[in-house]
Image (tube, helix red, strand yellow):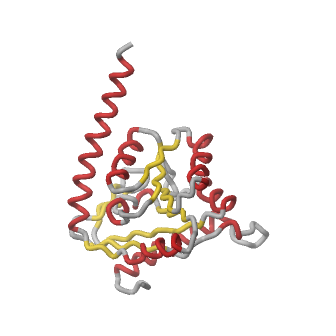
Amino acid sequence: GMAEPLRRLATRLGVRLVAGLMIAILWCWSATLRKETRQIERLDRAIAEGHQVLAVFWHGKYTPLFPLASGRQAVVITVDSFRGQVIGTISRWFGYRPVLLPAEVRTRGFPALVQQVENNASLIALALDGPSGPSHRIRSGALKLSTLHGVKIAPIGVASSHALVLRSRWDRQVVPLPFSRVAIAVGDLIDLSQASDADGAPGMEEIVRNGMDAAEREAEAILGGEGRA
């Protein structure tokens, strides 16, 4: 009957409203931040060298990445839910290409990721522990993409001088306050297709986690004025 089309229309309008509000807030807020983003050029260099790059970050740190990395032809991976559609709309506004994976990611998400790689997406962005946690639990899809398809993983660290931490959320979302300094670090590229799971060798998850820890420390160092260029 009429209920289903109406529900879809209401959802579409809701997504637009929420996304529109978020875009306005992100845009104004981003204009106030003092940004240390030189290291993002490391992604550009890797792409120029012909690599396919998977930029990974913790879900709790993703807000400043929208406005700060804009202008790059990135594919943003999210999930087909109300929140995912909002993120998709925001992504498009900042010039990215959102790909909404089916909500039951466990079964159908990975082929959609592989499809992006086969379509030659040079830069794919993904929250390592998204879309619903647990916090800092690494999703296997990112590891498989690198192992099986040679995609290079670029750990992204984010640090802010003054931020609000939303402790009630599973990802303890970190929202930099207006006028604070925000630093983005890009860690060394990780190629898991070269990694062996031999005895004594660190597991893939550990390799990526170490890369993420290093990128987070590097972002803090940039804030303190000691980071490398």
149 vs 173, nearest the viewer: 149
Q: Is any part of residue 204 visible from this angle?
A: yes
Q: Is residue 215 visible?
A: no
Residue 28 screen position, x and y as percent:
20, 59
Residue nearest the viewer, comparing 127 with 94: 94
Residue 10, image x, y percentages: 30, 29
Residue at x 69%, y 58% (from the top left corner): 148
Front residue of 107 and 125: 125
Name the outermost residue toward the right.
Answer: 199
User: Which residue is outermost to the top?
Assistant: 1
How many numbered marks are there? 0
- State whether residue 47 is above or below residue 218: above
Instruction: Residue 206 in the image: state x and y as whole percent.
Output: 63, 67
Front residue of this view, candidates 171 and 109: 109
Q: Is residue 97 left or right of residue 35?
A: right
Provide residue 119's location: percent of width, then percent of height.
57, 53
Q: Quadrant of the N terminus?
A: top left
Above or below — where is 3 with respect to 100? above
Q: Above or below — where is 120 with respect to 105?
A: below
- Quarter placement of the C terminus: bottom left
- Residue at point 23% right, 54% down? 25
| Residue at x 24% of width, y 58% of height | 27
The quarter of the displayed image where residue 15 is located:
top left
